[in-house]
Image (cartoon, rainbow, N blue to C red):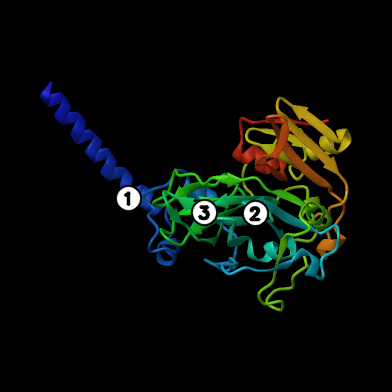
């Protein structure tokens, strides 16, 4: 028996040593040079699924010292422009997509909560995270990489890589960990003003740094297929169709738009007109109307906002392959 155990241990050791170089070969040398502090020995995904989006590390610069003005003092935003609306800890802030499109991440604090407000244009995914993990506050930047066309973020403390759509660590020390998502709304500027007239809105620190208000992805959400995506395409539905995703359930925007209101178990989804697509025309405030979506859950006789995402069908299919999509 001891001989068998020794033989098994020897076999496992040989297999491990044989496999290690093959795994190391999957890490491009350019990654190792650019990311010397990232532990590529820890990963939860096939590294071959991670592609370069073009820009290098921090080539799309996150905003670390955001500047805000009162809602009543804001200028230059049209009523139907999209913003990420966040109400938390007695405060309300709006993060316009005219700015987020060019920066993708805002490291901020609202109330007493350090947050990362994120937007991935290629997935139309706007998600807010609590930046705390094990008592440490993380700061996030962009890797310049994509997985399934979705933003791959990194934290500056360990240089671990994070999948934005899932909020999960996929490479490095924090591989396998998960950030807490915070409910927010992708809504029109007028919708945010109505519900938070005493709130604040993000403004550009350097107004001339980017062409804020312009959409560099003009026509993207009218393409037949997504850009920089090599995953599976969902059957029977247009891959660029917008869907409202809540965990492993999603409702197509055409269905919600048709019904106006959908109730599922304790969830209540509503739609009303009045928000531009940020991915249609060259000028964001001229994009076609995709409407305002609100997703809430019944709790003690009240309706409270829940985490959701208004994204594309191909994104939901890629990250929730066993999920259920409801269509007209």
Q: Which residue is mark 2?
A: 228
Q: Nearer the viewer, residue 216 or 275?
A: 275
Query: How far across and down, in percent of the image, does residue 240 sit?
Result: 75, 45
Residue drawn at (78%, 67%) of the image: 214
77 relative to 133 in the view: left or right: right
* Residue 100 in picture, x, y percent from top left: 68, 62
Picture quarter with the N terminus: top left
Q: Residue 322: in sight, yes or no?
A: yes
Dot 3 and dot 2 residues touching (CB under 8 Å): no
**Numbered disc 1: secondary structure:** helix
> Which residue does the numbered mark 3 point to in the structure image?
131
Snapshot quadrant of residue 32: bottom left
Q: Assess whether mark 3 and mark 1 are in contact (beta carbons under 8 angstroms).
A: no
| Residue named by callout 1 | 21
Q: Are the residues at dot 1 and dot 2 in contact (C-beta closer than 8 Å)?
A: no
Indicate which disc, 3 or 2, sits on the residue closer to the N terminus: 3
Q: Nearer the viewer, mark 1 or mark 3?
A: 3
What SS does tag 3 mark?
loop
Position of the C terminus by quadrant: top right
Q: Which mark is residue 57?
A: none
The residue that appears at 62% across and 47% down in the rendered structure is 230
Label 1 – label 3 distance at C-alpha: 35 Å
| Mark 3 surroundings within 10 Å by alpha-carbon count, few (fewer than 14), some (14 through 19), many (20 or more) | many
Nearest to the eye among marks 1 and 2: give it: 2
Q: Residue 76 in the image: state x and y as whole percent.
A: 82, 70
Q: Earlier in the sequence, mark 1 or mark 2?
A: 1
The answer to whether any part of residue 74 appears in the image is: no
Q: Check the image and report above or below for 132 versus 2.
A: below
């Amino acid at each position: 028996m001891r001989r068998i155990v020794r033989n098994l241990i020897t076999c496992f050791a040989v297999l491990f040593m044989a496999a290690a170089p093959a795994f190391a070969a999957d890490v491009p040398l350019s990654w190792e040079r650019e990311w010397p502090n990232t532990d590529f020995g820890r990963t939860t995904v096939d590294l071959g699924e991670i592609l370069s989006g073009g820009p290098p590390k921090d080539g799309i610069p996150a905003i670390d010292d955001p500047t805000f003005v009162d809602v009543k003092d804001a200028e230059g935003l049209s009523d139907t422009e999209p913003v990420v609306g966040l109400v938390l800890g007695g405060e309300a802030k709006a993060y316009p997509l005219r700015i987020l499109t060019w920066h993708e991440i805002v490291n901020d604090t609202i109330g007493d909560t350090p947050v990362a407000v994120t937007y991935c244009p290629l997935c139309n995914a706007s998600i807010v995270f609590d930046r705390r993990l094990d008592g440490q506050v993380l700061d996030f930047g962009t890797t310049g990489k994509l997985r399934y066309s979705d933003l791959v973020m990194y934290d500056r403390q360990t240089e671990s890589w994070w999948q934005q759509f899932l909020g999960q660590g996929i490479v490095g020390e924090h591989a396998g960990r998960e950030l807490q998502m915070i409910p927010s709304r992708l809504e029109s500027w007028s919708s945010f003003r109505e519900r938070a007239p005493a709130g604040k809105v993000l403004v550009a620190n350097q107004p001339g740094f980017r062409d804020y208000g312009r959409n560099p992805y003009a026509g993207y959400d009218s393409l037949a297929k997504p850009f920089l995506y090599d995953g599976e395409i969902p059957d029977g539905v247009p891959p660029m169709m917008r869907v409202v995703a809540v965990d492993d359930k999603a409702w197509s925007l055409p269905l919600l738009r048709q019904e106006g209101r959908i109730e599922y178990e304790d969830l209540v989804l509503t739609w009303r007109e009045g928000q531009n697509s940020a991915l249609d025309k060259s000028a964001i405030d001229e994009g076609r109307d995709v409407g305002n979506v609100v997703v809430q859950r019944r709790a003690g006789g009240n309706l409270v906002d829940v985490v959701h995402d208004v994204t594309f069908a191909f994104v939901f299919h890629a990250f929730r392959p066993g999920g259920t999509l409801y269509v007209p």
